[in-house]
Amino acid sequence: MAKNKLTGSLHTVLLSTTMMGVKRNYARIKDDIKNEANRGNQFVEIHLSQLFQQVFHRHSRDEADRIMIAGTKQTTPALTKVSSAPVKPWLFSRFFMLLSFSFLLLTILYLGFGSDKAIPGMMVVGSLVVPFSILIMFFEMNVYRNISLMQVNTTMLVGGVASLLLTMVLYDVIPSGNGVSLGSALLVGFIEETAKTIIIVIFINRFKLNYILNGILIGAAIGAGFAIFETAGYSNEFGLSTILLRSWQAIGTHTIWAAIIGAAVILGKQRYHHFTLHDALTNAHFLSYYLVAILLHAMWDWQFPVWWVNEFYLLKYLLIVVGWVIIFWLIDAGLREVRTLQGQQIRKRLK
């Protein structure tokens, strides 16, 4: 009985997110289009073996090039040609292997030849491996192909630094404590996620983006930049061993937290309008996901009062799973949004 209630609650959350994405686009959406978006809208099962099956297939350089040149005027497809099928990213794994191999070579240079000149490279490349690979995965998942790699890199670099600067400003204004107790961890989560949210809003408004998958990508770019620069800074302060610890943890931290907020910004704004302070304060869907990101961050930083939970990173493993489940919900909502938008265009042509 409890399991059925939980499944029902999860289905309600997903259905609400999906239909909200539809309703925000059309004030008077027709019932037949609404039914199309809602058809087969059961709880989404996550089949990782299918999602990542292309990772293990051989791909040509031309296939990689076609992905990398997305987002220009010549390569952005019309809405009718955008695919709403579940995407199967693979290029991100090549970036992961490339960066990992580069880090390995730098490590050999440092340990085998005692070259201190390899240390800056190890800090930079080691900080890039996981966040940048996840970012490329979201770039592949943006089926609209309306954001270029240049925009993504600009957002990651400028947005990442800007969010760190704004975080420092907020830390000066809001005393946050040591970040270990639950209250202090909540304040740290609020400060850092709010700083990223402000920068995410600026970039989404600047690029005039309107789709859920766009929001996920832009949020991930800013979160990845934040994570990369923060990890490099910690590595410089606490030593190279910090890179290994923070690299695997980056699977479930700033990049996906910011991606959740990026989707929330899109969900919270009126179509073809900028996201405003009024939207931030009044839209329940934005506020819900924004608070979820803060809570995930706070729980990550909190020192759970049971030593073996912290020692074996059990809470962090749980938070990684929860974060990615939310990401997949939002991706599913984004793909359903494509079908709804295409359905309206078809109805217009048939009139």
Image (cartoon, rainbow, N blue to C red):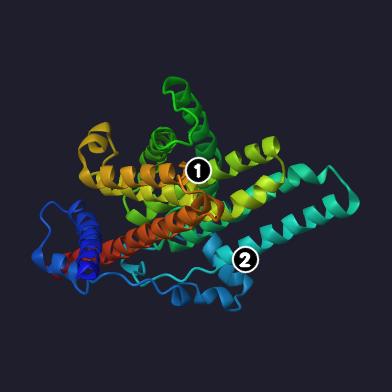
- Residue 64: where, in percent of width, then height? 58, 67
The answer to whether residue 121 is visible is: yes
Label 2 Cα crowd, 10 Å radius (few <14 / some 14-19 / many 20+) = some
Number of marks in the rendered image: 2
Q: Is residue 85 above or below residue 233?
A: below
x 50%, y 33%: residue: 162
Q: Is residue 169 left or right of residue 346?
A: right
Which SS class for mark 1? helix
Among the 4 quarters of the image, the one containing residue 176: top left
- Residue 141: where, in percent of width, then height? 44, 63
Residue with the most extreme right position: 113
Q: Is residue 102 left or right of residue 47?
A: right
Q: Which residue is mark 1?
A: 155
Q: Is residue 6 above or below residue 284?
A: below
Q: Nearer the viewer, mark 2 or mark 1?
A: 2
Q: Is residue 290 above or below residue 134?
A: above
x 61%, y 52%: residue: 247
Give, as a three-letter code, the residue at label 2: Arg
- Observer-nearest residue: 24 or 282? 282
Residue with the most extreme top position: 173
Mark carried by residue 34 = none
- Residue 92: where, in percent of width, then height? 56, 63
Label 1 Cα crowd, 10 Å radius (few <14 / some 14-19 / many 20+) = many
- Observer-nearest residue: 77 or 275? 275
Give, as a three-letter code, the residue at label 1: Thr
Q: Is residue 137 left or right of residue 43?
A: right
Which SS class for mark 2? helix
Quadrant location of the C terminus? bottom left
Among the 4 quarters of the image, the one containing residue 230: top right
Q: Which residue is mark 2?
A: 94
